[in-house]
């Protein structure tokens, strides 16, 4: 009886932990919105490379959240566990990605290129775009697939990577080693000493895996401090301090992006964002009062769908609407709001009417495929 009670308490604690990182979820959502704006607006002159910076934040925070959710859970380290975890994330995106691929294939500008079918298969249906130099260079109509390709690869290796976060000393050592590998690799490539990953360095799954893992390796340090911070979480002065920390860290992250855009390599921004994600993960500030609102959390939950739909909606705009007239009528920010609203509308329709049905259909196809094989 006592053992069962203890298990219930542990489960409650774990569930509370998994559902509590609202401010970090908000940071991920904002990063996704900025990436969408980066893609769908016709910029006369590119500002800060927000696209690259937000991708770095997304990979770090994704690794952090995986580590956070599984820090107190046992997960087997084998191929079966890897495929299961991979499929858990794949099933959330693959039906919509397939629909987008089919529609996009027809609305994309027609090219007399015998490799179009190969690009379609590699980039969009197999989701291994980041592994192919040819597909990366081709820029086939759905550019989001390199991101999915690298992220899914990181998810596939998560059961193995999680073994490194079970103790704080090992976590710190691995974080330092992984950071050095990330820095040294880019320093060598940028100085021209070697020409590996020269074309697809920004998209490469190995480089992105390092960023994902760096985020994951912050978890032991996070929980080490959390057990002390929790003693003060209901104190007003403590909440004020963390509200200031959240605001100041966000402003500093923007300052570093703007100030050192042409000075620092991406690897150094990765280190800056590791600190930013780490500080953002503590939900003790007053900003959570706004973020924990049910409507706001519902909006945040659409981030995967809006990310997938951005290119297809933008493609329809270019096909159907006179873009020159549209751009002359509306300021760039208004254009973005109009497009974003339409993207959200389609995301809402898909999630409400289609997502669950198509996900279950994919599950049935996979089960049938397994039966045929075995």
Image (spheres, helix red, strand yellow):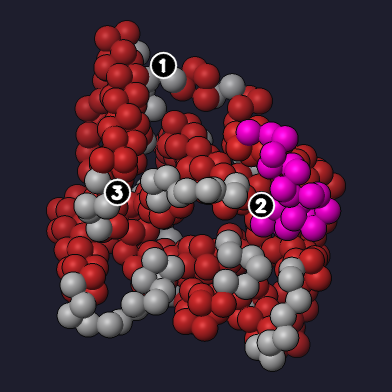
Picture quadrant where residue 185 is located: bottom left
Does residue 133 appear to the left or right of 217 in the view shown? right
- Crowd tier of the residue under label 3, counting other residues whose Cα lies within 10 Å: few below 14, some 14–19, many 20 or above: some
Mark closer to the observer (1, 2) = 2
Q: Secondary structure at mark 3?
A: loop
Q: In x, y percent, where is residue 36?
A: 58, 48
Q: Earlier in the sequence, mark 3 or mark 1?
A: 3
* Residue 169 visible in this rendered orientation of the protein: yes
157 shown above or below 248 = below
Q: Residue at x 69, y 63 (%)?
A: 97
Q: Give the labeled residue for mark 2.
A: 310
In contact (CB < 8 Å): disc 2 and disc 3? no
Magenta-tinted stretch: 309-331
Q: Secondary structure at mark 1?
A: loop
Q: In x, y percent, where is residue 30?
A: 50, 38
Depth order, front residue of 112/34: 112
Mark closer to the observer (2, 3) = 3
Q: Secondary structure at mark 2?
A: helix
Q: Give the labeled residue for mark 1.
A: 286
Give the farthest residue toward the top.
236
- Crowd tier of the residue under label 2, counting other residues whose Cα lies within 10 Å: few below 14, some 14–19, many 20 or above: many
311 shown above or below 80 = above
**Where the C terminus falls, by quadrant?**
bottom right
Picture quadrant where residue 277 is located: top left
Does residue 14 appear to the left or right of 368 in the view shown? left
Mark closer to the observer (3, 1) = 3
Q: In x, y percent, where is residue 107?
A: 79, 66
Q: CA distance from mark 3 to mark 1?
A: 31 Å
Please tell me the numbered disc located at residue 166. Answer: none
Q: Give the labeled residue for mark 3.
A: 261
Q: In x, y percent, where is residue 315?
A: 73, 58
């Amino acid at each position: 009886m006592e053992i069962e009670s203890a298990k219930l308490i542990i489960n409650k604690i774990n569930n509370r932990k998994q559902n509590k990182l609202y401010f970090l979820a908000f940071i991920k959502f904002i990063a996704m919105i900025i990436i969408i704006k980066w893609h769908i607006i016709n910029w006369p002159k590119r500002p800060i490379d927000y696209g690259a910076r937000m991708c770095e934040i997304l990979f770090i925070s994704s690794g952090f959240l995986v580590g956070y959710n599984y820090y107190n859970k046992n997960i087997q380290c084998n191929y079966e566990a890897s495929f299961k975890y991979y499929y858990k994330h794949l099933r959330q995106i693959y039906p919509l990605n397939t629909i987008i691929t089919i529609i996009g294939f027809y609305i994309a500008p027609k090219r007399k290129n015998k490799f179009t079918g190969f690009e379609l298969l590699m980039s969009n249906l197999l989701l291994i775009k980041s592994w192919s130099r040819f597909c990366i260079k081709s820029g086939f109509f759905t550019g989001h697939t390199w991101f999915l390709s690298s992220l899914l690869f990181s998810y596939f290796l998560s059961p193995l990577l999680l073994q490194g976060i079970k103790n704080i000393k090992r976590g710190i050592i691995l974080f330092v080693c992984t950071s050095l590998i990330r820095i040294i690799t880019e320093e060598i490539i940028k100085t021209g000493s070697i020409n590996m990953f020269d074309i697809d360095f920004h998209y490469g799954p190995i480089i992105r895996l390092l960023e994902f893992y760096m985020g994951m390796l912050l978890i032991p340090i996070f929980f080490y401090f959390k057990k002390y911070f929790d003693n003060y979480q209901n104190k007003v002065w403590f909440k004020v301090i963390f509200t200031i920390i959240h605001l100041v860290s966000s402003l500093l992250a923007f300052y570093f992006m703007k100030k050192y855009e042409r000075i620092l390599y991406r690897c150094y921004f990765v280190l800056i964002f590791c600190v930013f994600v780490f500080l953002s993960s503590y939900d003790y500030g007053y900003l959570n009062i706004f973020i924990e609102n049910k409507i706001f959390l519902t909006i945040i939950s659409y981030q995967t769908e809006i990310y997938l739909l951005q290119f297809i909606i933008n493609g329809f705009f270019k096909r159907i609407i006179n873009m020159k007239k549209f751009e002359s009528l509306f300021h760039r920010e208004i254009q973005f709001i109009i497009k974003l609203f339409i993207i959200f509308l389609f995301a809402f329709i898909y999630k409400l009417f289609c997502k669950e049905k198509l996900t279950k259909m994919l599950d049935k196809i996979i089960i049938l495929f397994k039966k045929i094989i075995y």
